[in-house]
Image (spheres, grey):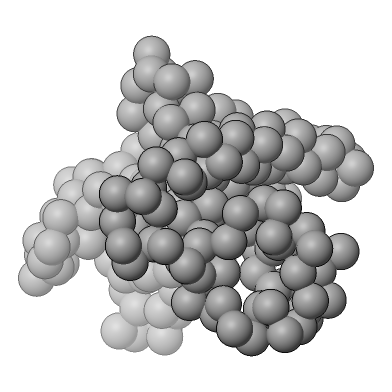
Amino acid sequence: MIPSSWLTVFGFFAFAAPGVMYDLLAAQKRAVRRESTLREVSRVVLVSTSCTALSALVVLIAGPPLTAWLPSCAGIPTAGELILADRNFLAGHTIGVSLGGFLFLAVSIGVALGAYLFNFRKVGSKLSYDSQWTLAFRRRLPAGYDSAVRVKLKNETVWFGVVRDFSVDLELADRELTLRPPLAFQKPGGEPSWIDHTRNGWGQVVIHGEEVESILVRYQRTSDEIIDR
């Protein structure tokens, strides 16, 4: 154990960084499953151990030739010197230890990135963890347009309106959709009844996500006041 607090912190970061980076990148390519914290941590530790072991081997093999080739790297200590190092040694070889540490970190990060690119080389575009409401009402909404919707509920009632706001929760039970004028509702088997919000003051309607059966979306310019009936 090297008796140096800052070196210990750097070593922990250098060990954990490859596994964390790999896991974050992989999450963009594969569906995230519900799993225990132990399983998640074990996966990160396994990847980190593999990457740091390989990077340590690379640094040990490439260290002597690199030291001989680049005079600026002559101060990089060997593995044996680091194992036996004390505070006086570290204080006298700060630059060398720092260069060796950053070289080790760069190699381990490179190994993790290479493993990610190799393992997911045949996987297409990144996965999106946004709800379809977020994609339809925000991500795909052209600039200067609003989302005009026809919302059919499970009780066969239909609401027409323009999306004012919505909750972005992935869980449907936690989502709500707020519509603004022009507003209309249609009872089962009936015709749309448009609400004159200028007379009665009703300016918005809030719909709970669990009550929604389907949503038709059309993008209209913000200045438009009428939704096709």
Instruction: Please report the residue visible at 43 percent of the width from the left and 31 percent of the height from the top.
Output: 114
- Where is 50 relative to 20, above or below? above
Q: Quadrant of the N terminus?
A: bottom right
Of the pair 96 and 186, the residue shown nearer to us: 96
- Height in image: 36 above or below 227? above
Q: Residue at x 47, y 67 (%)?
A: 75
Residue 96 at x, y = what percent?
50, 70
Q: Quadrant for residue 229, please give it.
A: top left
Pinpoint residue 42: horizontal percent, then vertical percent: 83, 38
Horizontal side, residue 224 vs residue 196: left or right: left
Q: Nearer the viewer, residue 42 or 151?
A: 42
The answer to whether residue 198 shows anywhere in this view is: yes
User: Image check: 40 left or right of 32?
Assistant: right
Q: Residue furthest front?
A: 68
Whether residue 160 is visible = no
Q: Nearer the viewer, residue 157 or 193?
A: 157
Task: State whether residue 9 is above or below residue 54.
Answer: below
Identify which residue is drawn at 48% across, 46% down: 63
Query: Quarter-wise, where is residue 141 in the image?
Result: bottom left
Please give the name of the residue rendered at 78% of the width and 58% of the height, measured from the top-left corner: 83
In the image, residue 142 lies at what x, y percent? 15, 55
**Total numbered circles:** 0
Residue 62, x across and y down, in percent? 45, 39
Q: Nearer the viewer, residue 184 or 129?
A: 129
Horizontal side, residue 225 vs residue 156: left or right: left
